[in-house]
Structure formats: structure tokens, C-alpha cells
Image: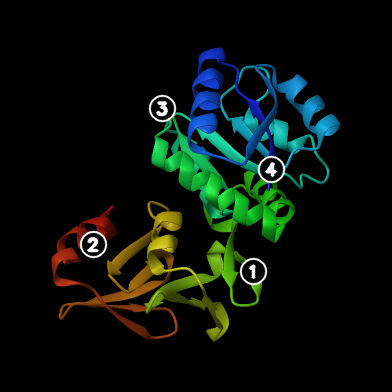
Amino acid sequence: MKIKTILIDDERKAIAILKNKLERLCPGIEIIAETQNPKEGIALIKELQPDLVFLDIAMPELSGFDVLKQFEKPDFEIIFATAFDNYAIEAIKHCAIGYLVKPVDNSDLVDAVKNAKHNIEEKTALIKNKQLIENLGAQTFQKKKIIVPSVEGLEFVKIEDVIHCEGETGYTKIHLKNEKSMMSSNSIGHFNKMLENNDFYLVHKSHLINLSYIEKYLNEGYVVLTGNAKIPVSRNRRQEFLEQLKK
């Protein structure tokens, strides 16, 4: 299976390095166009209908996010590239879209392409890209949604509705407001990476909680959440957790 690919980055050197790595490490990638101009990139995507676009975020005139917003139905898979940018990375992770941090690590590139191939086969790009655009317009983190892979497909969950995530042998049970819950096929580690540093805290290897729902902390090492859920706090995390609550 050949994956028609376009590279968009305002730095000529970055394109050359990425192209070389893709040709050496990622068989099946067919580079059909490359450009340093985001406006030209938009035209190339519309004309050539690629399966995959490597898209730099920080470009003059139009950012990578601005490029994405130019499409009514962005049904192509994207792997974003960025220097370390917390806001951009968090936005991308929430929607389970691929990204690479510059300078691009070889193993990270191989993994990102492998995931992209799977997503192309599953045809999930359109809904993920649309959710990213919606999230970029949200005013606060809690108003955004995350995309949750479940046994039935993909579900869209408002972050503000998540009370806590509970790991269960490789799966994650997500406890929501109104005593609802859902099971995800992703591990709790996946959700910790997605939600860490955003009002969520991994108090125990199996429990990730939304700090907005804490009712009280018990001295014996438990936290009580809205709905009276009593969650254990690991002994080695208690001091750091209490310091986090004081902030």
C-alpha cells in the first residue's frame, strides 16, 4: 500500500531531513509534493488529494492549524511537526492525532507513520481533524473534548464531564458526571499523557482524577470525589499531590 504524502514546512532544511528519513525508514511512503509555502500547500492538498500530510505548526503567514482550517472536509491524515509547544501538543493529543517534536527522532517518526497507516485504513482522519478545529476554538481547557477509542469505535467526551479514569488490565474505565461510565480500549497511561498538566492528576497507578471534582482529602491517604467515590492516593505520591492541591 503506497501512502501519497505531502510535506509542508517553511524551513527547507527541515523538509530535506524529513524526506531523507522517510525514504530510509518508512517504506510505503510516496512523497508526491513538498513546499515551504503554506498557501501553496493548501492548493497542493486540494489538487493531489494526499493520504497523509506532514504539517509544520509554526510557519509565518499561516500556521499549520490555519492550514487545516481551510478545509471544509479535512479527510487526510496529518502528522504535525513542532518545536516543543505545550499548547499545540496538548491540542493535538486530545484528538489522537500524530505529532513529532523537532528535531525529529527516528523511532518517533517510525511509530507516527505506523499509527498513520492504521488510521488511514480505519478512515478516522475527518472526525479527528474536525474535533481538533472545534477544540482550537474552545475558550477553556475543560470545555474541549477528547476522542476516546472504545470497543464500538470513537466517542467524543467533554473534558469537564470526566470525573476520573480507572485502569483495568490494559483498558480504562472513564467515570463521567451523572453516574455514567464508559470503557476505553486505551490504557490509563494513554489518558495520563493526554490530560496531565491540565487539572488532572495520577494519584495512583490505576487512578487519574479531575482535580475539579475533589470534595475532600482524608488523612489515611484517600481522596473523595463528587459522587462519593473514594480513591486511594499512593504513598509515594501523597506529598507531591498535597503540594499540587495548595497551588
Residue 25 location (% of width, % of height) = 48, 36
Q: Residues within 10 Å of mark 3 (few under 14, many from 20)?
A: few
**Which quadrant would residue 31 be assigned to in this image?**
top right
**Residue 204 sits above or below residue 144 on the image:** below
What residue sits right under mark 4 in the picture?
2
Instruction: Say few, some or many: other residues with alpha carbon within 10 Å of mark 2 (under 14 / 14 to 19 / 20 or more).
Output: some
**Is residue 244 found left or right of 11 in the rendered image?**
left
Residue to which mark 3 is pinned: 103
Sequence-earlier tag: 4 or 2? 4
Q: How many angstroms separate mark 4 from mark 2 (CA)?
A: 48 Å
Identify residue for label 1.
Answer: 155
Q: Quadrant of residue 101?
A: top left
Separation of marks 3 and 4 at Cα, in angstroms: 26 Å
- Residue that lies at the very extreme toward the top in this rendered image: 12
Which of disc 2 and disc 3 is earlier in sequence? 3
Q: CA distance from mark 3 to mark 1?
A: 33 Å
Q: CA distance from mark 3 to mark 2?
A: 33 Å
Dividing the picture into quadrants, the one containing residue 230 is bottom left
Q: x%, y% of residue 84?
A: 42, 32
The answer to which of marks 3 and 4 sits earlier in the sequence is 4
Q: Nearer the viewer, mark 3 or mark 1?
A: 3
> Disc 4 residue type?
Lys
Residue 19 screen position, x and y as percent: 55, 25
Question: Front-most of 146 and 21?
Answer: 21
> Secondary structure beneath disc 3?
loop
- The amino acid beneath tag 1 is Glu
Instruction: Kindly identify which numbered label has been placed on residue 8.
Output: none
Q: Which residue is mark 2?
A: 241
Kind of residue indicated by mark 3: Pro
Residue 33 left/right relative to 47: left
